[in-house]
Amino acid sequence: MHSFWRFENRWLITATLRMKTALSVGARASLMPAGSDLPVIKTPEGIPYIPGSSLKGVVRSYIERILRTMDQIGQTHQGERLWACDPLDEKNRCVSREQKKTLWEQAGEDDVRFTELVWQHSCTACRLFGSPWLASRVSFQDAMLSNRDSLLRLTEIRDGVGIDRDLGSAKPKIKYDFEAVPRGAEFDLTLVVENAEEWEVGLLLLALEAMRKGELPVGGKTTRGPGWGTIVDLKIQKVGKENLRDYLAGTGQPAEISPSELLQRLVTALQGGSHA
């Protein structure tokens, strides 16, 4: 079990998300008389950004799909099952509310023992991304727009229409518009991963690699065109117990590890797993 009570390591993952198409990350409906029906979320200064929660949702969903496939083919890591529950379905959650109560009683209401039991029953995805009973070990910072000065405009308005699912044609009197960040916008991505093993960071990189290839969209309306981009300038740094003192004192830098090396270590770590 990973320790939640002491520092083991910290991974800092940074990159730039460069949009090849427009980006639609919506806020609540605009209160302005001439505002868009679906405005883009912005800072108080009016600068568009991508919420960390949106990025986490994209990455977690992708990793959960990978883990479910791994579980289906019987892939394991050091004898442990690799799998993902359905965190939105109480009946199919790895640790339900009822099970949580049972584990709390089994632990004798001891926090440390309870955490150990919850960890043992939690799926691979919840161990990494968190659950109602476990803190996430991956933090996603809000991705701020980094090239605002090179863009002709920060947002643009696009038209949309409602579709009749039976006829496959536009529904009458259901026209709307939505705001989007134009193509060419660049956002700074930062992920901080606490107390993770190399193969777990490798799992995260599977999603980032899909984004690098332009295969994993971000935001809304992705089936209509917006949200497709690519990751560039991916950088991974690690602070471990061996260099923690120098890092805290400001006399040393985190060790840098190449993404391809970590992905290869993930493959190597899974090669010993069993297959159905």
Image (cartoon, rainbow, N blue to C red):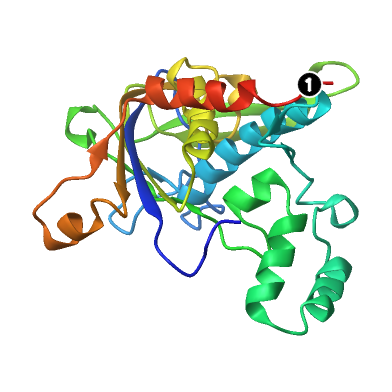
- Residue 250 quadrant: bottom left
- Measured from the top left, where is residue 20 in percent x and y? 40, 18
- Residue 229 quadrant: top left
Residue 126: tell me if it is visible.
yes
Where disc 1 sits, the SS reads: loop
Residue located at (45% from left, 49% from top):
51
| Viewer-closest of 231 and 136 | 136
Amino acid type shown at disc 1:
His
Q: Residues within 10 Å of mark 1 (few under 14, many from 20)?
A: few
Considering the image in quadrants, where does the N terminus appear? bottom right
User: Where is mark 1, residue-wise?
Assistant: 275
| Viewer-closest of 36 and 136 | 136
Outermost residue toward the bottom in this view: 109
Q: Is residue 170 above or below residue 218?
A: above
Considering the image in quadrants, where does the C terminus appear? top right
Residue 26: tell me if it is visible.
no
Asked if residue 147 lies left or right of residue 184, the reply is left
Residue located at (78% from left, 84% from top):
108
- Measured from the top left, where is residue 99 in percent x and y? 86, 67
Asked if residue 50 lies left or right of residue 234, the reply is right
- Measured from the top left, where is residue 44 in percent x and y? 32, 59
User: Disc count in the image?
Assistant: 1
Q: Is residue 223 above or below residue 200?
A: above
- Measured from the top left, where is residue 77 in percent x and y? 66, 34
